[in-house]
Amino acid sequence: MDRLDELAVFLAVLETGSLAGAARRLRRSPAAVTRTLAALEVRVGARLVERTTRSLAVTDVGRRVAEDARRALAAYDAAVQREETGLLRGHVRLSAPVVFGRRHMAPVVSRFLNANPEVTAELVLNDRNLDLIDEGLDLALRIGRLADSTLVLRKVGEVRRVVIAAPEYLASRGVPASPADLAGHEIIYSSTQSGPTEWRFEGSRGPVSVRLRPRLMINAVEPVVGAVAMGKGIGRVLSYQVAEELADGRLVRLLEGFEPAPLPVQLVTPSVRLTPARVRAFLDFAAAELSRLTVIRPA
């Protein structure tokens, strides 16, 4: 049996979360995937995943083997790809926040695939920062400052947290002149992150936090924007999420003088040295495409 194939099957099991999912991705029978995984576990001399009736959980040994497997397969890909002809092959798996991914990253992926017919891709949309290694991701788009110092970063732009309201709402309720004025307004709160219901601003004397009593809380950004556009209250989102609405006057940007520092928009990868050619090519392509977006250009 091809030992590189064993590693590829093992990674497919981890990335899809099940033996059946790996079988579908690899177009093999579940029994064949099970046999291959079992053979690899015998070769390693330890369990790589713990199987239950409903899910699989990678063991500590399995996590270490997965990291080594990704390095080995990346090195293999680099050795056999025909880079001298410019022909790229293989699969690219990446993630992005939901709204950004749908509006901006998906078109970038489509254009890249059009230019590289032998490449396939999977775009995972999730507002959580997924672990690149655990999730089998080649790269990701991240918004905000990152705690993981091991990632390789390429900045492509920046966005701001903006307070917004509809002109009709402001006509009836007035325009807040400072963050403290928000206490007298209806608040539409995006509850996509855990923590206290507050908004943080930058005042003349330093950071300012305003505790809120939201009239409506929604755990997704687009319904928040919709409710604000209907005049239901004041909301806060990232600037790229309402660029069109601000440009055409459907929404008004408030408290600009109190906005916190901008947040970086960046592409991240686990490493450069072990990155396959197709991933490096996509990284370069996406960085150039995204850097031209007016919605994430530095303000």
Image (cartoon, rainbow, N blue to C red):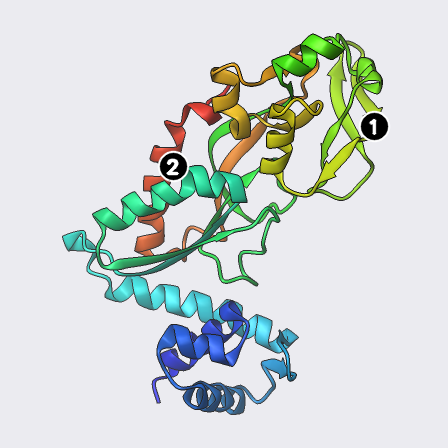
- Measured as percent of width and height from the top left, residue 37 is found at 49, 85
**Is residue 63 or residue 18 the one in the foreground?**
18
Which image quadrant for residue 108? top left
Q: Which amino acid does label 1 sit on?
A: Leu
- Measured as percent of width and height from the top left, residue 274 is found at 41, 58
- Point out which mark residue 197 bears: none
Q: Which residue is drawn at 24% across and 62% down?
A: 81
| Placement of 230 over or under 74, stated as above or below | above
Q: Name the residue under label 1.
A: 212
**Is residue 247 or residue 5 the one in the foreground?**
247
- Check the picture and name the quadrant holding the N terminus: bottom left
Name the element at disc 1. loop
Name the element at disc 2. helix
User: Crowding near pointer 1: few (<14 within 10 Å), some, many (20+)?
Assistant: some
Q: Name the residue under label 2.
A: 287
| Placement of 181 over or under 244, stated as above or below | above
- Measured as percent of width and height from the top left, residue 63 is found at 59, 71
User: Crowding near pointer 2: few (<14 within 10 Å), some, many (20+)?
Assistant: some
| Placement of 135 over or under 127, stated as above or below | below
Marked residue nearer the N-terminal end (1 or 2):
1
Which image quadrant for residue 179? top right
Left or right: 149 in relation to 1 = right
